Image: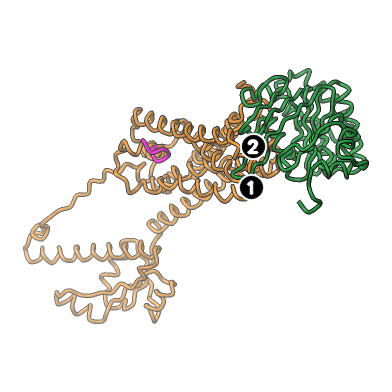
Chain colours: A orange, B green
Amino acid sequence: MIRKILVVTQKEILDHLRDYRTALTTLLWGLFVISLIGGMAMLLGTNLREQIEKPFTLRVAGMENAPNLLSFLEQQNIIIEPAPPDPKAAVSTGDIPVVLIIPPEYSEDFSSGKTAAVQLVYDSTRTSAAVDKTRVEDLLEGYDRYIGLLRLSVRGVSPEVIHVVQIENVDTATPQSKALLFFSTLPYLIIAVIFSGAASLITDATAGERERESLEPLLINPLPRGWFAIGKMLAAIPFIVLNLLITLSAFVMLFRVLPLGEIIGVRIGFDAGALAIILLLCLPVVLLASAVQTLVASFTKTVKEANTHLPYIALLVSLPGALIPFLPVKPALWMMLTPILGQQVLMNQILRSEPISAMNVIIASLGTILLSIIFTFIAVKFYESERILSR
Amino acid sequence: MIQVQDLSKSFGKIKAVNHVSFSALDGQITGLLGPNGAGKSTVLRMLYTLFKPDEGTAQVDGYDVSRFPLEVKKRIGVLADARGIYPRLTARENIRYYGRLHGVEKGALEKQIDLLIRLLDMQSIADRKAAGFSTGEKLKVAIARTLVHNPQNVLLDEPTNGLDVISTRAMRRLILRLKEEGKCILLTSHIMQEVAALCDHLVIISQGNITASGTADELRQLTGQSDLEDAFVAALGMKEEWG
């Protein structure tokens, strides 16, 4: 009898493969998203690095007022150029990120030992200008400290007098966790891939079967009606797994091929081993996706209707992943018991190269499998009811 | 052989089938005749186990439809009102799918498919994808998959509905051939002339009730009408108005 379920499964797989354009588009979707993320990471990384390492050109108005300051800046690898006549306008149009204005009274104040004011002109709504502004600020503070210390020394005061508190930064972030910016999208993405990997097959096998009026004759064949639902669910699984595999491989390749590690400045602990673990971790989610989508699509009467419902499910279930950054770091039992969220938290841990607890994996897997069984059961009952034939 | 006793089925407040009884014997063609919405398809749906009867029983070769649906389904071939086929599969693949669902052994299955393809004169379309088939060609595929497991009982819901004259004649020849093979054939129709020539036994159903049954001649005598259509209308016990 199990063989007859597989007959249904085989037919649905063959039918879906014949629709090669849909099948191909589904497979390419994962690749497309991955290349998008890769591109974004490249761009962001290159941007950061360029801005830090590139010799920096600073536009200065009133250059003649502070020759000492300017030569200090030039020693710090800054190229000084005169500012345009209207610095504020040039900044607000975005032509120049930052302008340093040295007022005429600077020289006098400086010489008389008073606090001498300079102005930094920038636009805080421009993210790209923020790095430049911080850099100039840091250099100016450096000059401020340097001259200050000199003045104290001249007066015979130890510099330690003004250093009341010394801050030493101890950052516990591992190199991997810094790269997490780029990985944080992965759990979200993987769930989305699982829930879209076979949506077209499921829609066609359920709502499509009704729409083209082939469901009723199909159900007259001698196997328990609920088994058709199971056969159709099983047909979705290889496509989801294949899609998942392509997406994960693409992610690994992305970090192999592109010098992202170098660009972001960290080594990335994402290898074939991590990929295999994530794949195994996701298998119960694959079951769940297949079951819940088959169930929902079975209730719809047309392909069009199914196509409006299924994307909501994909969105709804992958959303918890977006909450992960706001959750307590330590995985709690309730998270593991929440299907999909549990897997997303665990994936996040794997990507952070944290040890994951086998207990958590088992709890998350069992919870998800149990929910899949419940959905499958409801789908089987629905196929056995007369309502499946109502038009 | 099909036996129906006192069968009833309601949908909400609407009584679709009301205490219907009749038999369809092997080697005979039985016609279930009635106007649109009379309950013909509902009776068939109970026979092929998709609907459960509210009251009464029905047996196919002695198996009760409610208690042994799988045994019943193995013994019937059904051309349902809904006869959709899979457009991305070839005609042959469409037929093979049903054969495999019936558990027909591989060698025997391919032989039976070849036989049906020859019998229905569909060699030219056998290995073409079903997308773009004409109504007649689609019907041939649907008929072939109905007969792929060589069932003893054949249920045909409005088998000539939507067919042109040529296809209708081919369908009649096929039904007669099945009769010669000793099969039990139950078909529904709403056209008296069509079934009168074909059927050995007629069951007239109207608004869920059986109003008359017998051979065409018996119905003529019963109603006192010489014209078949008049006899049909008289047997329905209805006024002539839009139903």
Q: How many marks?
A: 2
Label 1 sits on a secondary structure element that is loop
Check disc 1 and report the residue beneath it: A302
User: Which label sits on residue B9?
Assistant: 2
Of the 4 image quadrants, the one containing the C terminus of chain A is top right
Front in this rendered view, residue A137 or B15:
B15
Residue in the picture at 58% in, 46% down: A29
Front in this rendered view, residue A377 or B229:
B229
Asked if disc 1 and disc 2 are in contact, CB closer than 8 Å, the reply is no
Q: Is residue A128 above or below residue A104?
A: above
Label 2 sits on a secondary structure element that is strand
Q: Is residue B211 above or below residue A366?
A: below
Amino acid type, callout 1: Thr
- The magenta stretch spans residue B71: no
- Lateral position of residue A61 relative to residue A370, left or right: left
Which residues, given as a range, are shown in magenta? A337-342
- Lateral position of residue B25 relative to residue A52, left or right: right
Task: Name the image quarter holding residue A147.
Answer: bottom left
* Residues packed near mark 2 inside 10 Å, few (<14), some (14 to 19) or many (20 plus): many
- Lateral position of residue B15 relative to residue A161, left or right: right
Q: Is residue A150 above or below residue B62?
A: below
Amino acid type, callout 2: Lys
Task: Name the image quarter holding residue B200.
Answer: top right
Residue in the picture at 88% in, 45% down: B230
Protein chain holding label 1: A
